[in-house]
Amino acid sequence: MPGQRVSLSGRLGNLTGMQAVVTLWIGQLVSLAGTGMTRFAMTIWVWQQTERATAVALIWVAAIAPAVVLDQEVSGKIQPRDVVQTLKRWSAHDDDTGRAEGNR
């Protein structure tokens, strides 16, 4: 929603604005790294167990298919222009807050 502020609360305390966004991005980065390592390890394991290219290919299809299907579903609902405008708004708000508090 335009003008809506992002906030996270929990074990990390209360995060708002860009702090919350960066925290989410870092979490996604860690998740993607783990997913990639799991795919790689599964590929090696399947090859060691079967020594068949067909089995390895099926593992890759099973690993990638959900991402392909979900990407097509989600990409139509997200408008990059709105994301960029929202990030600019948060950045401007954080800059204004920092100047008002004398932090910069």
Image (spheres, rainbow, N blue to C red):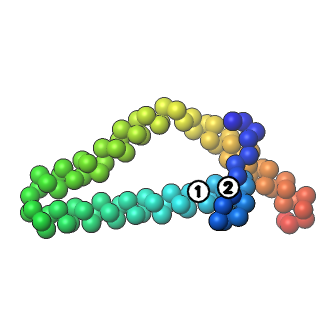
Q: CA distance from mark 2 to mark 1?
A: 9 Å
User: On the rendered structure, is 18 left or right of 28?
Assistant: right
Measured as percent of width and height from the top left, residue 70 is found at: 40, 40
Q: Quadrant of the C terminus?
A: bottom right
Picture coordinates of residue 43, whole percent (x, y): 22, 61
Q: Secondary structure at mark 2?
A: strand
Check the image and report above or below for 95 versus 88.
Answer: below
The percent coordinates of residue 36 (x first, y second) are: 35, 60
Q: Is residue 99 visible?
A: yes
Q: Amino acid at mark 1?
A: Leu
**Mark 1 highlights which residue?**
24
Residue at the far left in the pictured view = 51
Direction from residue 33 to residue 17 in the image, left or right: right
Look at mark 2 in the image and give the residue it sits on.
8
Furthest-top residue in this view: 76
Query: Could you tell whether 77 is left or right of 32 in the image?
Result: right
Q: Amino acid at mark 2?
A: Leu
Image quarter where the N terminus lies is top right
Q: Foreground mark, 2 or 1?
A: 2
Tell me the tag on residue 62.
none
Whether tag 2 and tag 1 are in contact, CB under 8 A, the answer is yes
- Specify the quadrant of the image occupied by residue 73: top left
Residue in view at x 27 percent, y 66 percent: 41
Q: Quadrant of residue 26?
A: bottom right
Q: Residue at x 76, y 39 (%)?
A: 3
Few, some or many residues within 10 Å of mark 1 (<14, 14–19, 20+): few
Give the left or right position of residue 2, taking residue 29 as reference: right
